[in-house]
Image: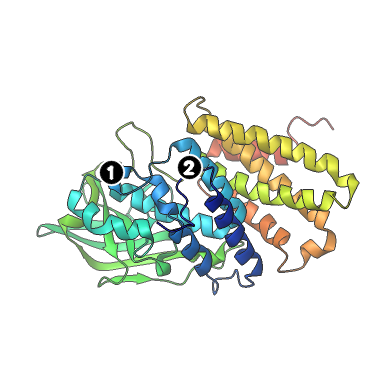
Amino acid sequence: MSDNFVSHIESEPLETLCAEISSISKQQTDWTVNGWPHEQLQRIAQAGVYRWFVSEQHGGLGWDAGDVARGYIRLGSACMTSTFIVTQRVAALKRVATSGNAALVERRLPAMLDGSGPGTVGISHLTTSGRHLTKPLMSAVLDGRGYRVNGIAPWVTGANGAAQLLLGAVLGDGREILFLVDVAAQGVSVEAGFDLVALSASHTGVVKCVDVVVDPEMIVAGPKESVLVNSAGKGGGAGGVQTSALALGLAKSAIEFIASEARKRSDLVPTHDALQDQLNFITGQALALATGQQDRPGELRANANSLVMRATQAAMIAAKGAGFVKGHPVGRWCSEALFFLVWSCPQTVADANLCELTGGGVEG
């Protein structure tokens, strides 16, 4: 185990890791579809971050939900794009680890944990993207002992930086499967990432499958109805504490920038203090939700969305014209904050954010 291995949340290696990837991110100039946070992801893998999320039985560290949330806040503050990619890699490895497919776990999980064979997920079409369509975006038919898959996964992050993909497909009878496939497998093609308002360097785009053969040994879950719903009856999407934690991490970056400016400009002190108090309060909400002390995920997400929008825009005001020059981190943060208005954002949360944006509760 190397000296920079992050084995627990309160550790010097975590401080070092976040400082390193923050420094690398500040020096990175290309955040377009041509960029890729290679160095940041390499440091994250070397530090053992992917082991936070699975049990010791499966080669992980078995961090509890509270420490995972705190870890995501720290990483999100250091580099939002890298941390977003991490969430998708973690989504894949966690589903493999809990699949119950012992042979698959033994063959595939070690490389996902050490970062030498990262995975990513393409399952949004089973939850939101394309659910309204008559024909599934990705379909599967029985083919001998396994399946033959055709279609697209419309939103896949970092597929061209992954070795394996965890995808979902729908059978003719409506049942669904999750399966693992190599990026280099015959019939799999990764399209160029979308040119997004922010996070373009995450290389989020379409993955196509044309007559891709899936052996039964590569099945992660299913076939069953609503394969993403776990035994507790709760969806396994990307929302909840994880998404809010990343929003809080980005807000933390902006608030720390305001703090640095406030040391030179006393007029910014009240702004910093108010935002810092809100960050502390909402972080407490996130940890309470993660540890089961409260059960209001919508309220947490709405509060986190509100804070990250306001904190990044306050940082822009503090930065003045310099922040509006392309390449300044504050401008990037403001764009990245918009992502939380669309990433796994439930309608109730969107409604709460719209109410705030339209001046709800404000008398004319």
At which x and y percent is residue 160?
41, 70
Query: Which residue corresponds to the image point at 32% horizontal and 56% vertical from the top-left?
Result: 167
Instruction: Return the residue nearer the eye: 270 or 7.
Output: 7
Q: Secondary structure at mark 1?
A: helix
Dot label at residue 57: 1
**Residue 42 seen in this snapshot:** yes
Mark 1 to mark 2 CA distance (whole Å): 18 Å
User: How many discs appear?
Assistant: 2
Direction from residue 105 to residue 137 in the image, left or right: right
Q: Is residue 355 visible?
A: no
Point 22% across, 51% down: residue = 172
Q: Quadrant of the N terminus?
A: bottom left
Given residues 275 and 240, the one toward you in this image is 275
In the rendered view of the protein, which quadrant contains the C terminus?
top right
Report which residue position mark 2 lands on: 68
Q: Is residue 119 left or right of residue 284?
A: left
The residue positioned 82% from the left and 53% from the top of the image is 261
The spot of residue 175 in percent (x, y) is: 24, 45
Q: Secondary structure at mark 2?
A: helix
Q: Label 1 amino acid?
A: Gln
Residue 117 vs 364, above or below: the answer is: below
Identified by mark 2, the residue type is: Val
Which mark, residue 317? none
Residue 226 image point, x, y percent: 30, 41
> In the displayed structure, would residue 247 be above or below residue 184?
above
Badge 2, how many Cα within 10 Å: few under 14, some, many 20+? many
Color encoding of the figure: rainbow
